[in-house]
Image (tube, coloured by chain):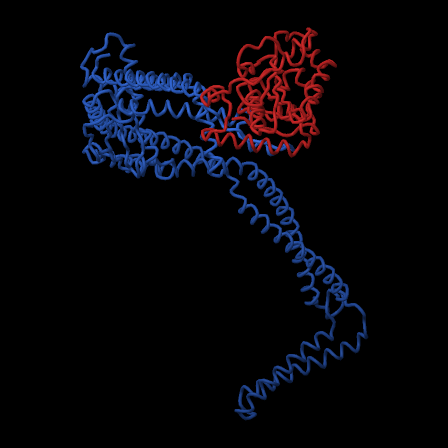
Chain colours: A red, B blue
Amino acid sequence: MGEVDHFSAEELDQLNIIGGGKKSSKILNIFRELRTQLLKVNKRNNFVCMISSISHEGGASYVATNLASVFALDKSKTSMLIDANLYSPSLEKLIIGDAQVGITDYLSGQNLDIKDIVYATGVPRLRVVPIGGNSEGAAEYFSSDKMLSFIKEIRSRYSDRYIFIDSPPITESSEARILSEIADVVILVVPHARATYNQVESAINIVGKEKLAGLVYNN
Amino acid sequence: MDFTLLVNYINVVFREIWQRKFLCLFAFTFISFAILVVGIFWPSKFEISATIYADNQNILKPLLNNQAAQSSVQDQTKVVRDMMHSPRILNKVIEQIFGLDSFETAEEQGQFLNILRSKIKISRLGAGYIKIAYSDKTSMMSYRVINSLVDTFLKSSSEEQKSESREAFLFIDNQVRQYKDQLVLAEERLKEFRAYNFDGRDGDVDSSISRLRSQLEELKISLDEGKITVTSLKKQLLGESEYSSQQFKKSVYSERLNDLETQKHALLLSYTDDYPDVVSLTYQIEDVKKSIRDAAEKEKNSGSKAKVSASDEGAVLNPLYQELRSRLSTVYTDIKTKEKRLVALKKLKDSEYERRKRIAERGAEESELTRDYKVTKRIYEDMLERKEKARLSMTLNIEGQGVTYRVQEPALPPLNPTGLRFLHFVILGPFLGLFTVIGLVVMYVLLDQRIRFSEKLQTLDVVTLAVIPHVKTPFSKRVIRADMIICLIVGSFVMAGYIGLAFASKMGLL
């Protein structure tokens, strides 16, 4: 797994990923602020953060991608993005080249090594684990010991790596609830005009206030 | 609501509109065209009004006086409305404008009459002023109808006034006759009643009874007095004898002697002793003295006897006794007479009581008859007075003095139609379409429970880490641009179609 070519500014723009340019400085600052707050909440160097939306197409993948990208901006740190969004996987686009297998393939017991499912992206210091092609029974995979050992393994391999899990909407899937158990902190994305106050309250109760880092309102 | 919140709301509303742009465009088009179509079929109205003045001197007002409700100006408006809406006047108007036999059937004419009636509006402007308004599709028709209506009404009103006053006079005249007959009847009944009623009145009987009572009281007292007198006289009679004694004679002679001596002394004051009258008196005195001595002698000889009887010598009738007997007899007679009178008075009193009962019984009947008579008389006199007023009013009306309506403001032909015109609808359509769409979206935003403002999250006990603005990717920008072009093209077509339809309608091409 060697380094690949990086995305150009236009490509980043196309993929809706923030870069270091002036064009997206406002949004970049927002994500930098989000990074600072997250580091303040969690003192560990390589915490596992799950990002879930309140409802379908709520922008969790967008927030997860950009948050991981912002963490990777620091040259002394790397970040990893695990695509656990079974119903709307979207992280393969970050990978330059083909992604043959992903996390579901690994967890389903195929004879794969971790390095086989971790891909480099067009964003420097950002690695992605795609969803893979075996998403049936994913809830069971995510709750398996293998999932726990996988997280433990990637966490222990690099002490300066931050792991972000892009999960399905928490109010609509059991997988997100299972993943929230594995994660150290959870960020809930509240999409504009897609979630009611009661739904937000319900999602907070599901996650629990101990693990909940906070809310991100996505316009 | 502070300014930031207002701006946020406006942004949210426009965002919602943009998200549903094609639906909103369709709603806008539909509403605009619907209003335009309404405008095309909206009938033009030319409203004309005329003002008439209603003189409040109603013919019945002085006649009815205070006995009936007087007609007010408010009622006058109702009268005018009733008259103008009446088929009699409306048929005349139809006849004047459309001519005779303008309708094939009576039903058609009836329907047209109803339409005409619904277009006539009558309202009160002020004291006595009544506005008559009429609206129709053309200016000329409105003008002709209102002029015809007002003229027909005024003529008809004048005729009606005359007829009304004549009817009022005839009515009152008839009433006067009826009341006169009733009065004569009441008078006759009262006369008849009084002719057969001899008992008089309550007051007469009462005074009569009172008088009889006092007479009875006096009579009873008088009887008691008489009885006491009888007792007293009887006692006196017992003490007196029927015949008097010598002593009585002596006392009579003594009295005579005193008289003679008094006369002699009187003469001696003027004459001497040898005056013949004095001499005569002296002889008479001597004779009387002799008689006294003889009586004394006889008394002495006969001794003292308690009672003198008729057989006694010298016994004469006792005048006192006679007097007492006479008085006793008189008192007896008086008592008898008074007793008879007492009985008679008692009978009279009883009969008076009977009379009073009869009067009381017939009193109710009499008072009813009297009341009937008085009321009928009062009404008759009143009606007689009104009859004369009615005659005067009728004469005034016949001579044309009692006209109560006149045209204050004549009707003028209108230049422009009244109310909403086609141009109003053409302008109103797009505006109403736009505002309706915006209004509906505002309502949707206000009623929808979904979170549209990040501030709302602050009420939760959880930190809001970030608020990410809406990000436009190059792709989404292209999509937006394309959508905008489509919207503009569609919108332009819509507006072109709208203006074209409006123009075609105005030119009469539709």
Q: Identify the image quadrant of residue B293.
A: bottom right
Q: Position of residue A201 (x, y in %)?
A: 64, 26
Horizontally, residue A57 falls left or right of residue B14, namely right
Quadrant containing the C terminus of chain B in the rendered view: top left
Q: Position of residue B241 (x, y in %)?
A: 75, 66
Q: Which residue is at 51% across, 23% downward?
A: A17
Q: Position of residue B72 (x, y in %)?
A: 34, 36
Q: Identify the image quadrant of residue B413.
A: top left
How many marks can you see?
A: 0
Given residues A59 and B379, the one toward you in this image is A59
Horizontally, residue A11 falls left or right of residue B175, namely right
Given residues B78 and B342, the one toward you in this image is B78
Given residues B150 and B295, the one toward you in this image is B150
Q: Identify the image quadrant of residue A174.
A: top right
Q: Position of residue B221 (x, y in %)?
A: 67, 57
Residue lying furthest front: A2
- Is B26 rendered above or below residue B245? above
Given residues B311 and B440, the one toward you in this image is B440
Horizontally, residue B306 falls left or right of residue B344, namely right
Q: Which residue is at 63% across, 30% downward?
A: A214
- Is B9 rendered above or below residue B290? above
